[in-house]
């Protein structure tokens, strides 16, 4: 996973006001939010916040470098800079301080680029 910290928000990014639609983990993982159909949205949760990453289907959709995150809360994996499917879970209790800082940077990265569509409940 690339180190993207110094980039700042992309130019000309216009984000919609955040939504607070509740999603269960089960709802998030349904085919409708994993990009399995090219006409459906792709959602990734980070720290319980659900982001619509559909604009980067080539990365998060089937066959993409980060497709393992689609329809899941990827918090632990992002904190560990991992794409191992076993790490793609919301539980961050095993992350150390430096990994939690990495996770916070990824959260900022996502919030500057993708619309917030809800929260995992």
Image (cartoon, rainbow, N blue to C red):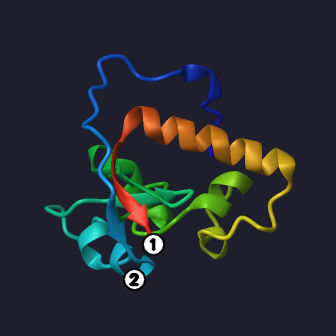
Q: Secondary structure at mark 1?
A: loop
Q: Is residue 81 left or right of residue 36?
A: right
Density class for disc 1 (Cα within 10 Å; few <14, some 14-19, many ≥20) is few
Q: Is residue 27 left or right of residue 38?
A: right
* Residue sitting at x 71%, y 43%: 102
Residue 37, placed above or below residue 59: below
Viewer-proximal residue among 20 and 62: 20
How far from the left and from the top, in percent, is residue 51?
38, 52
Q: Is residue 50 left or right of residue 15?
A: right
* Residue sitting at x 56%, y 44%: 107
How far from the left and from the top, in percent, is residue 21?
30, 62
Q: Nearer the viewer, mark 2 or mark 1?
A: 1
Q: Which mark is residue 84?
A: none
Q: Which mark is residue 121?
A: 1
Q: Is residue 24 left or right of residue 99?
A: left
Q: Secondary structure at mark 2?
A: helix
Residue named by callout 2 = 26
**Extreme residue toward the top, this view:** 11
Q: CA distance from mark 2 to mark 1?
A: 10 Å
How far from the left and from the top, in percent, is residue 119?
41, 61
Residue 120 lies in quadrant? bottom left
Residue 82 lies in quadrant? bottom right
Indicate which disc, 2 or 1, sits on the residue closer to the N terminus: 2
Residue 26, placed above or below residue 62: below
Residue 71, placed above or below residue 50: below
**Extreme residue toward the bottom, this view:** 26
Quadrant where the C terminus is found in the figure:
bottom left
Q: Are marks 2 and 1 in contact (CB under 8 Å)?
A: no
Density class for disc 2 (Cα within 10 Å; few <14, some 14-19, many ≥20) is few
How far from the left and from the top, in percent, is residue 69?
49, 63
């Amino acid at each position: 996973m690339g180190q993207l910290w110094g980039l700042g928000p992309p130019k000309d990014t216009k984000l919609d006001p955040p939504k607070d639609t509740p999603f269960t983990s089960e709802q998030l993982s349904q085919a409708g939010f994993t990009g399995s159909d090219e006409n459906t949205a792709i959602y990734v949760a980070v720290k319980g916040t659900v982001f619509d990453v559909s604009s980067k289907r080539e990365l998060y959709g089937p066959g993409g470098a980060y497709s393992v995150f689609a329809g899941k809360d990827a918090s632990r994996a992002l904190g560990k800079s991992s794409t191992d499917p076993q790490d793609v879970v919301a539980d961050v209790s095993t992350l150390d301080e430096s990994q939690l800082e990495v996770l916070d940077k990824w959260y900022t990265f996502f919030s500057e680029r993708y619309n917030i569509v809800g929260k995992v409940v």
